[in-house]
Image (cartoon, coloured by chain):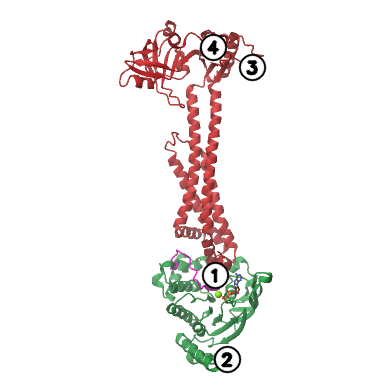
Chain colours: A green, B red
Amino acid sequence: MTRPVLEVRDLKKSYGEGEATVHALRGVSMTVHRGDYVAIMGSSGSGKSTLMNILGALDIPTTGTYLLDGVDVGSLSDAQLALARNRLIGFIFQSFNLIPRTTAVANVELPLAYAGVKPKERRRRALAALDIVGLADRAGHEPNQLSGGQQQRVAVARALVTEPALLLADEPTGNLDSKSTDDVLQVFDDLSAAGKNIVIITHEDEVGARAKRLIRLVDGSIVTDVRQSPIELAPVGAAAAHAKVQSVAAGHLAAGHGTVARGSVYAAGGRHTA
Amino acid sequence: MSFFEVVRFSLRGLSANKLRSALTMLGILIGVAAVILLVAVGNGSAKAISDRIEALGTNTITVMSTGRGGSSSTALTKKMADALIDPELAPDIKSVSPVVSASSATMTYEGTDHAVSTFVGTTPDWFGASSTPVEKGASFTADDVTQGRRVVVIGQTVAEELFPGIDPIDKQVTVSGALFTVVGVLKEKSSTGFQDPNDTAIAPLTAVQQVLAGYGSLTSIIVEANDPDKVDAVQSEVSTILNQQLKVDSSSSSTTPYRIQNASSLLETQTETADTFTTLLGAVAAISLLVGGIGITNIMLVTVTERTREIGIRKALGAPRRVILNQFLIEATLLSVLGGGLGVAAALIGSQFEIVGVKPVIVPSSVGLAFGVSVAIGLFFGGLPAARAARLRPIDALRYE
Ligand SMILES: Nc1ncnc2c1ncn2[C@@H]1O[C@H](COP(=O)(O)OP(=O)(O)O)[C@@H](O)[C@H]1O
Ligand SMILES: [Mg+2]
């Protein structure tokens, strides 16, 4: 197997000191291989965002190592970190985080500008990225002229415009209605089908069900890590995910516990992709 | 990323926050313009004062009685004035003009009264020594003085009051019951203070003594030097002669019964006063610059939250620290340089107009100082938060509140 896209070993992160110390991560180890589409689920405060910020090189762990594309992120200088964020990672925030009073296309161009791409080429690639998320006609709009779903799709375009090795999304649909959620998730499915590596945080079962692999975090530790569909195939898509969630609910009700549910989840995924 | 691109980013940043940019620039503009203009006003009034003193003539000295004891033995007399005309003892003296002045004399022409604020009796040399030229008609002559002829040269104010629309030359006016003939009108003088310098009348010494002041002491003696450089020599010559005349022992007594006023020393003290005034205005201006600076700081700090979040986003997208710093420094520089430049322009335009009766005269160093300080404030308070935010981890910048 080729080098993993990312690999974390015994990642720990605590905030504060003494009595008030919060252990947000208590030793997380995981490896993501090329072509995977990973969903991380967990209740609020379970450490999902903390993990994601470390994966995005936005934050540093208290202890533990993080290899991004084989490179130990902990050993990188400030300038190298900037380069890694720019070239290797596309980060999508729950709160969009577009630059205010700046057009969609200018927002998408930003990472390219920091990568030193020439203005003309930059514009072309930014428009292409906006086209992928279906917003080519909104290029000249500023964030406050766009709906939440559209803003998030601009943010997705911005994250993928540099063609990063890894797309990270922290509850990208958390602030969106179901229609916008579908739009954004469709973009992720398409990107995954095109071979992108994606890690997404969610607390919605339907969102989690679309990923090829599902990791559950409880209180800063990984409790389950399930492959839902084969890594080399395209993701299952919305309809299958919906069916799967329905059957989980049914199975859960019938059997009264989760192991059965997990089995049927895998079956549902397999059936669709076959 | 090229420098040119960073500049473009800064311009975009400024135009994305137009109101904030405009307010910051306005603060700097007002601060800079206030400093430059206030200093210019101070400097302008100082210049106006020294111009007027120079117009009095820097080659004259004025001898005045201190009136100590009030006895006639210490008073200045015509005899003393005559004694000063001595090519032997006082070779540097060009002219001596004894002066008596009556502080208020009522002049009447065909039923119209006017109280002349200073009625001066003197000799013809006075006109030259005191830089008071006659505009219309002529001054009186030495002969008029010896004969005690009742002729008078009047100031502009007197002419306007008594002879509105009439040529005053050769008209007869009554002063204290005596008839005087107007022979000339003085050229208008600009005001040196509260007193109107044009509300005056000049007549032969003898005539004024006869009619108004009596034959007692002189008010002052104006001595004109051959050359402005000789003023000090003249001053010592005058004191030598006067000490002889008044029998003052120059070696033992420090209190002479007369006082010598020298226009150039007057100029010095006046300039000092004016400098103090300018410094005071400068201090007021500096305070206004400081207040302006606090305003700028305030605007900049209020936007730090928003800008810090923005810096967090930019860092998350892979912006190197140096590029972020440059962008924000260039933004701050553009704001303060543009604001400062506009402030200088506003001050230059403002200085074309009279402000509270003073024509401002720009002090070049105040331009440099005001501009420099405002740019420094802008750079410091614009750059400092950015520098701090650029050092933060992206996640901390994003969470900043
Ligand atoms: N900056 C911080 N300072 C202190 N505690 C924090 C900070 N960020 C997160 N935490 C704590 O760490 C835990 C995990 O938070 P987070 O990773 O945001 O959870 P999730 O995203 O799963 O809801 C929570 O208990 C939270 O209170
Ligand atoms: Mg979270």
Pointer 1 residue: A86
Q: Amino acid at mark 1?
A: Asn
First of labels 2, 1 by sequence position: 1
Front: mark 4 or 1: 4
Mark 1 belongs to chain: A
Is the residue marked 2 within 8 Å of ligand 1, measured from its CB? no
Q: Amino acid at mark 4?
A: Leu
The residue lying furthest to the bottom in this view is A254
Q: Amino acid at mark 2?
A: Thr
First of labels 3, 4 by sequence position: 4
Mark 3 belongs to chain: B
The residue sitting at 45% across, 71% down in the picture is A151
Pointer 3 residue: B254
* Image-based side of A100 in relation to B159, left or right: right
Alpha carbons under labels 4 and 1: distance apart:
95 Å
Q: Is residue B235 above or below residue B37?
A: above
Residue A259, numbered circle:
2
